[in-house]
Amino acid sequence: MSAQLEIRKVAAGYNRAHPVLKDVSLQLERGRFIGLVGPNGSGKSTLVRTASRGVKPLRGRVLLAGKDIWSYSARDFARRVAVVPQEISVPFDLSCLEIVLLGRHPHVGRLHLETVEDESVALSALDVVGVLPLASRSIREVSGGERQRVTIAKALAQVPEVLLLDEPTAHLDVAQQTAILSLVADLSRERGIAVLAVLHDLNLAATWCEQIAVMDSGRIVEQGAPQDVVTESLLAKVWQARMWVRRNPMTGRPYMLPMPPLFEPDRSDEGAPTVHVVCGGGSGGPVLTMLMSEGYRVTCGVVNIGDSDEELCRAMNIPHVAEAPFSPISPPRAAANLKMALDADAIVLTDFCLGPGNVDNLRVVMEALKDYKRVISLKSSDSDSGAETAQDYTDGQGSQWLAAIREQAQVVSNPPAVLDALRAQLGRN
């Protein structure tokens, strides 16, 4: 498919000696929605301004339908390329319809007023973006999301082949952001418009854009489908951000969650007690975080790779034993887990689901009890029935072991009580 708009080896900016854009190349095809992302100051807005004739390239060319954009008259270019800026400035008290009619100016002859056809196009554009009832309302009286829709309607009234948007979701709430990007994606697909949108929210870009182009220091460093581009390593390299990247089970597209700050425990306190946490399935998070915050030396195991407890251990530099998911605990990892437990001053057992893959964790706790280790068992319960919440998928073996452990361990009902029990047992204020 040939490009409707092509940015070819462009250098551009406001200082010839120090261009903002450096050898940038990008192709926009009909019906394709590309999200342009990158850190602040990476050149995203300058690229949009260059593509819309706001900035002339110092080197390279921008082509529209194979022709240099600077070979078009301003009127002809505006008939084919529409721009939605970050902010819309309205010096006069115009109605929403009058704002949208401004988009018809490239199609209106010199010294001619808008025709009935122009008004029909403008009203249709307002209808498409869902704000037709606001046609007679002042643009100053509508909400931020409604104003952004009116601005997009103005761009649509130009009947463009290319739509350039510079942060179209800035200052909007999450519902308005979703609605705007859903609208833009539908317009691109249904009308065959080539769309380039500068976006700050990577989750929004990954959800709605067919492709993502990543800018860093004036260059495009990655481009492709969201699932190929958005990776933990890229986020660390370009944004210096520690993020977890997961896949949306409905779409297969990535979404990002922030990792906790890298935690460096104070190793100078050699007298701090060591607590070994036996957990899984996300049950260990509150306990692990609390113990680290209180200055304990913490170990953990065995947890499955990819489990949220395992990810938290990696994020907080907690020594741990990890096993592949859906696999029984291997003898070497069981031995490593047992060594951590026996080396610790106390053991905390959280309330996790019991299955064939993790029942060996209970065996380790039982061995630790035989070695006279202090064990604290976290036992959650249903507030109405008092039933234990831990589920057993081991034909009862896990429940038997757990009951035997709790006969000898100190049983508590919540994470703060774990901390109180440790303070009492270990004599630490």
Image (tube, grey):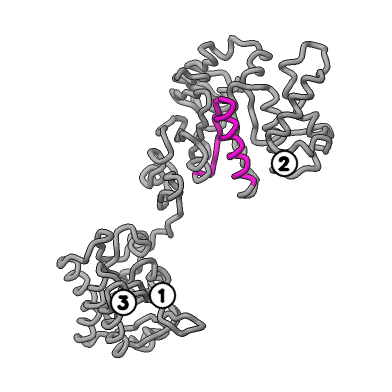
The quarter holding residue 340 reads bottom left
What is the quadrant of the N terminus in the image? top left
Is 228 drawn above or below residue 349 in the view shown?
above
Magenta residues (range)? 176-202
Query: What is the spatial separation of the Cα atoms under label 1 and label 3, in whole angstroms?
Result: 11 Å
Tell me what residue is drawn at x 40 percent, y 73 percent: 287
Identity of the amino acid at label 2? Glu
Residue at which label 3 appears: 275
Mark 1 against mark 3, which lies toward the viewer? 3
Q: Sequence order check: which comes first, mark 2 or mark 1? A: 2
Labelled disc at residue 294: 1
Q: Sequence order check: which comes first, mark 2 or mark 3? A: 2
Q: Secondary structure at mark 1?
A: loop
Identity of the amino acid at label 3? Val
Tell me what residue is drawn at x 71 percent, y 17 percent: 106
Residue at which label 2 appears: 146
176 left or right of 280 in image: right
The quarter holding residue 259 reads bottom left
